[in-house]
Amino acid sequence: MSVHKEVKRVTTHVLAEMKLHGEKISMLTAYDYSMAKLVDQAGIDVILVGDSASNVMAGNETTLPITLEQMIYHGKSVVKGVTRALVVVDMPFGTYQGNSLEALNSAIRIMKITHADAVKLEGGKEIMESVERIVMAGIPVMGHLGLMPQSIHKYGTYIVRAKEELEAKKLIEDAHYLEQAGCFAIVLEKIPAKLGQQVAEELKIPVIGIGAGGGVDGQVLVIHDMLGMTQEFSPRFLRRYLNLASEIKTAVGNYVADVKSRDFPNEKEQYD
Ligand code: KIV
């Protein structure tokens, strides 16, 4: 039985059912109304309004500069385009690390204004109190472990995380803490496939991977990467389904040539 084909609206409960039935969860990012509408119509289960918007939409080097107001703007735009997928909004850097009340207030602001279904936070045991407080307020929380881009200045590199035993052990512990705190799912980014599978097997909640191998409960990619709009970024885990960068450049080049040669607009493309 396919849980995903049966439902009109994906909820956190539906995702739990998918894990129970061994059905993989599909998740992609989106940051605007038009793209979210297409991704939703194509049948995605979860749309993440990722703080990767800082990189792919705003052109920043890291996810750190994006603000709560900017994430709310993207979240609101995405929600308007979606009728079926579960929409999760990333809580940006600096809006939840201070204390659990700050975290709760930021999460409430996101939910009230965007009408999204859930929020996502990066971190393990150290954010457990915040996760509990947000969940207690009735807001579903997705966790995020492994490579956490908001901590890039601590790591100093985007290499695979948790290859060493000590870091792997901490990641497993953190995953259990997040489950205990009430997360409905967690994202694992750029870790060894074996470790991803172990965490997915140990947890009852769905584990969604990006560069965490095929043994987890679902996969997430950044939409600009999987559509081939970003050209410089080529990690091993990325599968490109289109070469949109080249398609767009060809189309724009053709338009420029048509305007210059006066081929556009032709007679049928103008009014009498
Ligand atoms: O911001 C983002 O796009 C993410 C994904 C990489 C999971 O957090």
Image: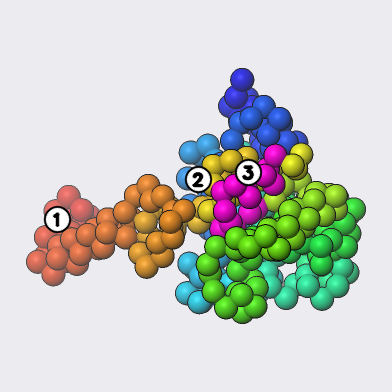
User: Is there CB contact under 8 Å for labels 1 and 2?
Assistant: no
Check if mark 3's residue and mark 2's residue have beta carbons within 8 Å: no
**Taking 80 as reference, is 99 above or below it?**
below
The answer to whether 222 is drawn above or below residue 52 in the figure is: above
Q: What is the residue that sits farthest to the front in this orientation?
A: 165
Amino acid residing under circle 1:
Asn
Indicate the quadrant where residue 255 lies: bottom left
Q: CA distance from mark 3 to mark 1?
A: 58 Å
Residue at the spot of label 1: 266
What amino acid type should be assigned to the residue bearing mark 3?
A: Gln
Q: CA distance from mark 3 to mark 2?
A: 27 Å
- 215, above or below 67, in the image: above
Measured from the top left, where is residue 14 in percent x and y? 70, 34
Dot 3 or dot 2: first in sequence order is: 2
Q: Residue at x 50, y 45 (%)?
A: 39
Residue at horizontal 56 percent and vertical 58 percent from the top: 190
Q: Give the labeled residue for mark 3.
A: 197
* Picture quarter with the N terminus: top right
Q: Local crowd at mark 3 within 10 Å, few (<14), some, or many (≥20)?
A: some
**Circle 1 SS class:** loop
Disc 2 secondary structure class: helix
Question: Left or right: where does residue 103 sit relative to residue 90?
Answer: right
Residue 112 is inside the magenta segment: no
Q: Earlier in the sequence, mark 3 or mark 1?
A: 3
Q: Which residue is mark 2?
A: 39
The CB of the residue at mark 1 lies under 8 Å from ligand 1 = no
Q: Nearer the viewer, mark 3 or mark 2?
A: 3
Secondary structure at badge 3 equals: helix
